[in-house]
Image: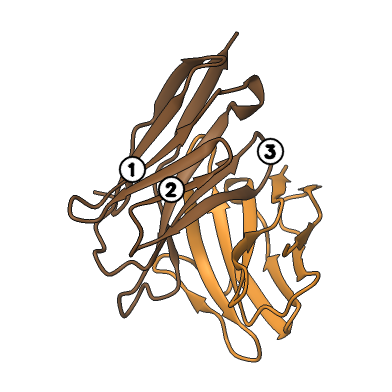
């Protein structure tokens, strides 16, 4: 079946630094990838939709300058949290969509900003 | 309110059946999904059902769809301790702004007791 690899699985960074999270589709091409944020004991909140070769579409209330998304190839999308602050601490999950497999999720990244 | 609604908690004894219920609002949804999330992990697709089906069975899992009432349920037979997790139902949006995006419920915490 389809596999989406997400790295790192956890990261601790200092306030003011930037963190990059990678999401790779390993055995299929993902024309569309989604980035979610999940707070403890809550559902997934869609942050943005990433389409290969074009600009990401951000959901209302999500700062595009803070959460930079790049989808340069059919197998890789990255989310960069710029100038991270403690309130950015969260669990970030990516998902890739393709016609054969539907929606496949990465294993998530636990970001802690100190 | 949310477009997809679920009860938040279910406690079940090991060996019994679990039934998780979900209601959704987008009557044009073509696919409805059930995902499982264990602590600190991403989402694992359990099963899905196409909107022209009433029921789908996959080993211990049975999905029932009542399209008239926009009600979806997941039954887990012979529930095991390893089934303890959060279960999310989701529909694939078909609206102009939601097309292709998954709309998640809040998640049902299932606790299996010995």
Mark 3 vs mark 1: same chain? yes
Residue corresponding to mark 3: B40
Label the orange chain with its letter.
A
Colour seen for chain B = brown
Q: Residue at x 66, y 26 (%)?
A: B82
Residue B70: percent from left, percent from top: 24, 52
Q: Residue at x 50, y 26 (%)?
A: B110
**Which of pointers 2 and 1 lies earlier in the amino acid sequence?**
1
Cα gap from disc 2 to disc 3, whole angstroms: 18 Å
Residue B89: percent from left, percent from top: 43, 48
- Give whichever of B95, A11 is nearer the camera: B95
Q: Is residue B50 at all visible to an observer of this figure?
A: yes
Q: Residues within 10 Å of mark 2 (few under 14, many from 20)?
A: many
Check residue B22 in the rendering and tell me which mark sits there, or answer none.
Answer: 1
Residue corresponding to mark 2: B89
Cα gap from disc 2 to disc 1, whole angstroms: 7 Å
A106 w.r.t. B112: above or below: below
Q: What element carries label 3?
A: loop
Q: Which of marks 3 and 1 is in front?
A: 1
Residue B40 located left or right of residue B68: right
- Give whichever of A78, A81 is nearer the camera: A78
Check residue B55 in the rendering and tell me which mark sits there, or answer none.
Answer: none
Residue B52 located left or right of residue B48: left
């Amino acid at each position: 079946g389809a596999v989406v690899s997400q790295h790192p699985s956890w990261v601790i960074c200092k306030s003011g630094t930037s963190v990059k999270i990678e999401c790779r589709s390993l055995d299929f091409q993902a024309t569309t990838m989604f980035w979610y944020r999940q707070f403890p004991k809550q559902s997934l909140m869609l942050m943005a939709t990433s389409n290969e070769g074009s600009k990401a579409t951000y959901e209302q209330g999500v700062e595009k300058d803070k959460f930079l998304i790049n989808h340069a190839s059919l197998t890789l999308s990255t989310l960069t949290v710029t100038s991270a602050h403690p309130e950015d601490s969260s669990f970030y999950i990516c998902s890739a969509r393709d016609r054969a497999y539907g929606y496949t999720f990465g294993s998530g990244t636990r970001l802690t900003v100190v | 309110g949310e477009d997809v609604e679920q009860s938040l908690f279910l406690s079940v004894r090991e060996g019994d059946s679990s039934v998780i219920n979900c209601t959704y609002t987008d009557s044009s949804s073509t696919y409805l999904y059930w995902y499982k999330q264990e602590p600190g992990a991403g989402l694992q697709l359990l099963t899905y059902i196409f909107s022209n089906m009433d029921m789908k069975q996959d080993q211990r899992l049975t999905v029932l769809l009542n399209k008239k009432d926009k009600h979806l349920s997941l039954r887990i037979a012979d529930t095991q301790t390893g089934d303890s997790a959060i279960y999310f139902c989701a529909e694939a949006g078909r609206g102009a702004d939601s097309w292709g995006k998954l709309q998640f419920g809040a998640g049902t915490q299932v606790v299996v007791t010995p």
